Structures are given as structure tokens and as C-alpha cells.
């Protein structure tokens, strides 16, 4: 069974007035109106911007952002965000936190004796100083309190389309100026809409038999469905997320993420130290991928071969990689770097670092949409929805979206079908098949296996996540990181930090105000508004770490199936990340950055003096890099690449599936997605997933032909 979706009204009933007042106070502190003195200083410090723009942001307050005649408010939005994205257990923990802030006695302890009154009764300045103290505390618990209060405020404001007052003040267009019109049609027209089963069809098909059922429609499921259907097999693809046609994509951070992503948000690990970005819709993460199309490098294939998987050094796998790249239109032609990607290229060139273009899965077409993380409205990006799944459809495959598979049906040690909840209802329906292919992704494939009764100790463990840290440089001219392609450049300069090729890659991230505001440390209301006012002048570089021995795993709520991720970075991987961060900061300086920041509030902000050139040999800059290394990696990292939770290998002692992709425990049950990777790829895993899945899908096809007996 599933639990009813909580709402803002649910939280109002669950929490006391004092707890709600504490939340309001936090919102109005993090995004509070500046004093006249601070407002004047903000305007003075930003003479390169219109004074009216700076004054507008100085006056902005979480309590006054509502548009006239609108029911929307930051407070109500924050409650809705909590209800939508935070499970019951975590809501209870948040409730306890707000309860502590509501008590004078516990506030005395949390403030180390400075304040013995409820948080809401303190002045804005007093609350601000408390949050800053907590943020820089040596105690992880206090840092977590500060992080929670700040992130809730940012998530309820800058990424919302209703917050147009904030967007105007920072120079961000609230909507894509080209593609947001109701009558917009891309130059080549929209792709044909794929057909999903209706509820009536799904219920009437109860008990139907197929040659194969594929659970999931992403990089693994799309390839598996196409390969099986092309081999003449009857195929049913079941996807837990919705099918969203290109014409229905909403080009806005908040709306797109809440509709297309796992848990309707960018959600945290159980410890809160890693945030996950994972697509949950037809086409999976390929639909929201940033178009990066990279093959696994030689050292990854060699490592897999050393673990007994020699196939990954064969010409057949090389051919599969090429087949995948051809099918999804991987190409560097048509790339037009935006200013952020050009900064990465220029900085690397000036330093003598490696740099290159990233092939895009756009068939060589110019692709200027910076909203692809919430879907490609132009239909240019070749996700599985527009490639492999269309191939599958052309060969008779059938599709069922918005349907959660509860378990694989197993009889006498063989998979025989699935039991699922159709269209997010409580109606259980069973379908039968000779083969079941689990392609639910690294977050959900382990849950499907465990709910089906498999007990292999490796299920859900050995996960790899490519932990990411981000650094920022502020430049003299506007960069408008919300324009142009998202990710078109890469550097391998620090991929081999310790000689084992478990290092870091440097790339560029999309820079929309919600992402930006959430990543950069909050250093007080005035400092925050100064950063946001200069949003258009910042350029990020992400440091993507190929994790070697960090501990990552995934478990699931046994009733709801909700994902619960866990992560702890290792010393080795932290060292790789820090060296990558230092290199990224050098790149920004070499490209002309005047100010530098990381996402760690305990790292200082570095600025070159007005009479100093941007120079990587500057002694103060070198001391800044040493401080970064000494303080360590950020408390919170991010991942969009999740792999290895049902790893492939030659023995069930260390693996979940055989080299063929079939599980060790159950016959005719295959896993076909990035969860089978023996280790992290070190680059965007989409191409690797599709090529590995192509090989597994061929094994599934061959399994229908009995081995000859001599």
C-alpha cells in the first residue's frame, strides 16, 4: 500500500503554532529586508548595476514576495515543498528541530547561553548571527540546523516562477523567452506522441503473458526493450514515472524538477551529506540528462576485465559503444559553447591543462536550450524516449507508465512475471512473462530485487555516485549562465591524481538561480543578496570525482518503496576531490576570475585586490588553496550519476548478477542498467549503460533458444 500525499495543510495540523512561527522567522531571516544602512551599502558596492535593481533586492523579504491578487506565498510554498519532498520520519525530525527553536530553554543551549528566548522572538540581526555561528560550528548537528533553515528558504523562493520580483532584481528571465509560449512549436515540429496503456487497458490485460517484461524505460530499459522487440519478442515496458511529451515540458527549475525527478526534488541522503538528482519519468534520466555523451575510458574497461569480465575489452563491446553513439547521434559538430563552458576551455588552455569538447546526443544539431535538465522542449536531445523506445514501439512493444512494480513473481526459482500498482492506484495487477528484465536504475533495481525475495548481501551495496563539488568564479562581465548549452566542455587534468585513475574531471553546470542560491554558502542576508545581485557574473566548475572506495548504498521503505540513500566519502576520494577543486579554482583564475568561492561555508571567500591581476602564482591565492585543502571537502556534495548497486561479477560472493546480467539467485531474471557496473565510469554513464545493456539484452534474446545437446 502507499500512504496519502502530505500537503501544506497536513503540516499545519501536525505542527504547533510555535513551530510554524519558528519556520516563518527562519524564512524572514535568510531572505530578510535589509536595514537602511545595509541597503545603502549594497547599492554603493554594486555601482555597476542599476540602483533600482539593488534597492529592489535589498527590500525583498520572504513575507512580501506574493504578487498582488495571488494566493502564493513563500511560507505556503515552503510548507508545500516540505510536504511534497520530505517523508514522514524526516518531517518529524524537522518538527523536533523547530520545537527546539521554539523553546527558550533549548535556545539557551543552542546559542551557548546568548539567548534564552524562542527563535521567533529574536531580532533579525540576532537570528542571523545565530545561523552564522551554527553554520561555522565544529559540531555537525549545528551545521545541519543552519543548512536546513537556509535550504528551505532558497527552495521556496529563487527557483519558483512566482518569485518574479527576485528574478527581476537579479536579471534572470523567469521563463524561457523563446519556448514558454503556449503556441510554441520547435522548428522541426514536435516528435510524434508515444502511446501508453490507459487504465482500462492495463486492468483488462490482467494475467496477460509476454515474452519479456522490462521494468524501467531509461538507458538500460530502453535498449533492452528495443533489442528484444527487434528480435521478435513480445515486450511490455513498465515505468513508474509519467510519460511527458515534449510539448508538455515546463521550462522552470521548480516545476520541472517536481514533475520529472525522483521524490519530486533534488533529495538528500539519509545523513544529509549527498544530494541526488535522478529522473523519474518515461525515458528515465536520459530525458533530463545534460546531453553529455562520453564513452568509458580504457582504464575503466581494463579494470572490469581484471575482475573477470574480459568481455569489456573485446571488439564486440567496442562495436556496441559505437552502435550506441550512432543511434543517439553523438557528435561534437554543432556545438556552440556558452560563456561558462568557454571559460573552462580558456582557463585550461592558459594553464596547459587537458581540455576537449563533450559529444552531444543531438545528431550534430545546434542546441541552445539551457533547460535540458527539465526536458528538451525542442525534441533535439536523443533520449531513449526518442530513440530506443521508438524502435521498440515500431516492433510491437507496449508501454505502461505511472505504474510501480511491487515485486517480480517467482515460481520454482524462475521469474514468471510481475505484480504492480497500476497508475499509482491501490489496484494490484499481475502480468506474466518468460523473462523479466529489471532496468529500474541504481536507486530502484535493488528494491525490486529485495521485494521479490532475493537475499544476496550485495544488493543495494557497492554503489558508486561520482560525488561532485562545485567552485565558483566571479568575473568582470555578465556571463548569463542560464543561456546556451549546459555542458559542452571537459578537462581530464586531474583524472589520475594518485596514479590509479580514480581522480576527478572538470566540467560546467547549468546555472539557474535556484541551483546557484542553494549551492553558494549563506553568509548573512546582506552578503547573500550581494551574491544573488551578481548572479549573472558567476561561472561554476563542477569537480566530478571517480569514487574508488567511498561507502555508498541504497535501501528502501518496505511499504512505500521510497529510496533511502547513504554515503560516506573516503580519504582517497576526498583527496581526489580537493585536488580537483584546487585545479578548478586555478582554471577560473587563469580565465580571469576576480573572486572565488566554494560550496563549503568554512572555506573563505578569496578576492584579488583592484590593483592585482588574476594570477595563479599570487601568494595569497596559493595560501587560499592550502586553506581549502586543510579545511576539507564540503559537508554536502551532489550526484547525478548512480551506479553499481547490483554489481556484475564472476561470483555471488561479491556480485548480484552474472556476466550475462542474469541474477545468481533466480533464473530468467536479469538486471540491465547502470546498477550492474563493477566500478564507477568516471564520466557521464549514459553511453556505458546503453552499451552494457545492449550486451545483456543479447544474452536475454539468446536465452530463448535452448542450448543444443550433443
Image (spheres, rainbow, N blue to C red):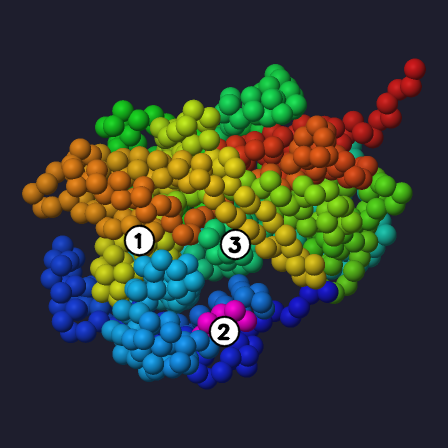
Q: Which residue position holds label 1?
A: 602
**Image side of residue 48 versus residue 535, left or right:** left
User: Can residue 189 be seen in the rendering of this structure?
Assistant: no
Instruction: Identify which residue, 226 or 306, lies in the foreground.
Output: 306
- x and y percentages locating residue 32 in the rendered image: 28, 71
Displayed quadrant of residue 201: bottom right
Element type at marker 1?
loop
Q: Say which label, 2 or 1, has the lower sequence index.
A: 2
- x and y percentages locating residue 470 in the rendered image: 36, 45
Q: Which residue position holds label 2?
A: 96
Real-space CA distance between mark 2 and mark 3, rounded to the nearest whole angstrom: 19 Å
- x and y percentages locating residue 86 in the rendered image: 53, 65
Q: Nearer the viewer, mark 2 or mark 3?
A: 2
Residue drawn where x is 67% and y is 30% of the image: 649
Q: Say which label, 2 or 3, has the lower sequence index.
A: 2
**Image side of residue 651 versus residue 108, left or right:** right
Rendered view: 318 above or below 483: above
Instruction: Identify which residue, 115 or 427, lies in the foreground.
Output: 115
**Start-end of magenta stretch:** 92-98
Q: Which residue position holds label 3?
A: 269
Amino acid at each position: 500500500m502507499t500512504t496519502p500525499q502530505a500537503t501544506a495543510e497536513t503540516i499545519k495540523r501536525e505542527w504547533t503554532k510555535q513551530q510554524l512561527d519558528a519556520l516563518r522567522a527562519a524564512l524572514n531571516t535568510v531572505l530578510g529586508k535589509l536595514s537602511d544602512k545595509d541597503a545603502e551599502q549594497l547599492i554603493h558596492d554594486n555601482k555597476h548595476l542599476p540602483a533600482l535593481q539593488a534597492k529592489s533586492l535589498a527590500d525583498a523579504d520572504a513575507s512580501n514576495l506574493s504578487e498582488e491578487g495571488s494566493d502564493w506565498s513563500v511560507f505556503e510554498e515552503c510548507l508545500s515543498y516540505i510536504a511534497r519532498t520530505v517523508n514522514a520520519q524526516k518531517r518529524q525530525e524537522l518538527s523536533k528541530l523547530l520545537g527546539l527553536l521554539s523553546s527558550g530553554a533549548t535556545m539557551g543551549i543552542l546559542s551557548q547561553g546568548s539567548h534564552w528566548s524562542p527563535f521567533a522572538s529574536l531580532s533579525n540581526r540576532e537570528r542571523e548571527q545565530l545561523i552564522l555561528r551554527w553554520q561555522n560550528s565544529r559540531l555537525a548537528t549545528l551545521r545541519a540546523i543552519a543548512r536546513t533553515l537556509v535550504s528551505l528558504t532558497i527552495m521556496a523562493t529563487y527557483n519558483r516562477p512566482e518569485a518574479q520580483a527576485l528574478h527581476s532584481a537579479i536579471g534572470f528571465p523567469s521563463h524561457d523567452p523563446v519556448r514558454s509560449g503556449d503556441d510554441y512549436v520547435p522548428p522541426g515540429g514536435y516528435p510524434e506522441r508515444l502511446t501508453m496503456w490507459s487504465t482500462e487497458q492495463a486492468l483488462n490485460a490482467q494475467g496477460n503473458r509476454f515474452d519479456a517484461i522490462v521494468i524501467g524505460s531509461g538507458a538500460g530499459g530502453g535498449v533492452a526493450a528495443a533489442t528484444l522487440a527487434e528480435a521478435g519478442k513480445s515486450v511490455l515496458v513498465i515505468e513508474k514515472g509519467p510519460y511527458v511529451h515534449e510539448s508538455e515540458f515546463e521550462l522552470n527549475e521548480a516545476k520541472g524538477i517536481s514533475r520529472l525527478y525522483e521524490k519530486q526534488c533534488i533529495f538528500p541522503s539519509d545523513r544529509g551529506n549527498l544530494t541526488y538528482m535522478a529522473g523519474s519519468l518515461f525515458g528515465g534520466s536520459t530525458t533530463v540528462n545534460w546531453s553529455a555523451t562520453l564513452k568509458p575510458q580504457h582504464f575503466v574497461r581494463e579494470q572490469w576485465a581484471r575482475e573477470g569480465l574480459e568481455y569489456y575489452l573485446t571488439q564486440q563491446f567496442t562495436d556496441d559503444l559505437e552502435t550506441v553513439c550512432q543511434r543517439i547521434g553523438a557528435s561534437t559538430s554543432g556545438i556552440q559553447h556558452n560563456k561558462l563552458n568557454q571559460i573552462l576551455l580558456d582557463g585550461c588552455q592558459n594553464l596547459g591543462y587537458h581540455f576537449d569538447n563533450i559529444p552531444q546526443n543531438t545528431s550534430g544539431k545546434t542546441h541552445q536550450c539551457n533547460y535540458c535538465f527539465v526536458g528538451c522542449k525542442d525534441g533535439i536531445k536523443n533520449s531513449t524516449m526518442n530513440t530506443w523506445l521508438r524502435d521498440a514501439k515500431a516492433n510491437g512493444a507496449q508501454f505502461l507508465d505511472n505504474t510501480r512494480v511491487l515485486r517480480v513473481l517467482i515460481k520454482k526459482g524462475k521469474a514468471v512475471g510481475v505484480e504492480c500498482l497500476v497508475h499509482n492506484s491501490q489496484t494490484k495487477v499481475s502480468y506474466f512473462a518468460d523473462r523479466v528484465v529489471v532496468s529500474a536504475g541504481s536507486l530502484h533495481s535493488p528494491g525490486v530485487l529485495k521485494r521479490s525475495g532475493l537475499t544476496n548481501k550485495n544488493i543495494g551495496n557497492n554503489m558508486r555516485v561520482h560525488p561532485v563539488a562545485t567552485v565558483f568564479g566571479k568575473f568582470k562581465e555578465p556571463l548569463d549562465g542560464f543561456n546556451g548549452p549546459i555542458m559542452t566542455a571537459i578537462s581530464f587534468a586531474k583524472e589520475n591524481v594518485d596514479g590509479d585513475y580514480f581522480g576527478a574531471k572538470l566540467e560546467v553546470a547549468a546555472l539557474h538561480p535556484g541551483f546557484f542560491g542553494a549551492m553558494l554558502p549563506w553568509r548573512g542576508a546582506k552578503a547573500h543578496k550581494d551574491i544573488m545581485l551578481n548572479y549573472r557574473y558567476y561561472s561554476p566548475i563542477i569537480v566530478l570525482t571517480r569514487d574508488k572506495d567511498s561507502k555508498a548504498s541504497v535501501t528502501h521503505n518496505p511499504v512505500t518503496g521510497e529510496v533511502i540513500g547513504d554515503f560516506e566519502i573516503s580519504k582517497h576520494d576526498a583527496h581526489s576531490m580537493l585536488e580537483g577543486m584546487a585545479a578548478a579554482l586555478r582554471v577560473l583564475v587563469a580565465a580571469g576570475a576576480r573572486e572565488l568561492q566554494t560550496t563549503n561555508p568554512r572555506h573563505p571567500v578569496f578576492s584579488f585586490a583592484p590593483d592585482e591581476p588574476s594570477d595563479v602564482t599570487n601568494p595569497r591565492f596559493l595560501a587560499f588553496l592550502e586553506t581549502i585543502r586543510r579545511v576539507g571537502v564540503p559537508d554536502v556534495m551532489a550526484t547525478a550519476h548512480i551506479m553499481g548497486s547490483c554489481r556484475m561479477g564472476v561470483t555471488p560472493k561479491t556480485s548480484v548478477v552474472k556476466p550475462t546480467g542474469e541474477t545468481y539467485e533466480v533464473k530468467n531474471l536479469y538486471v540491465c542498467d547502470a546498477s550492474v557496473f563493477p566500478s564507477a565510469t568516471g564520466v557521464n554513464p549514459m553511453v556505458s549503460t546503453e552499451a552494457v545493456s545492449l550486451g545483456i539484452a543479447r544474452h536475454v534474446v539468446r536465452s530463448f533458444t535452448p542450448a543444443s545437446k550433443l
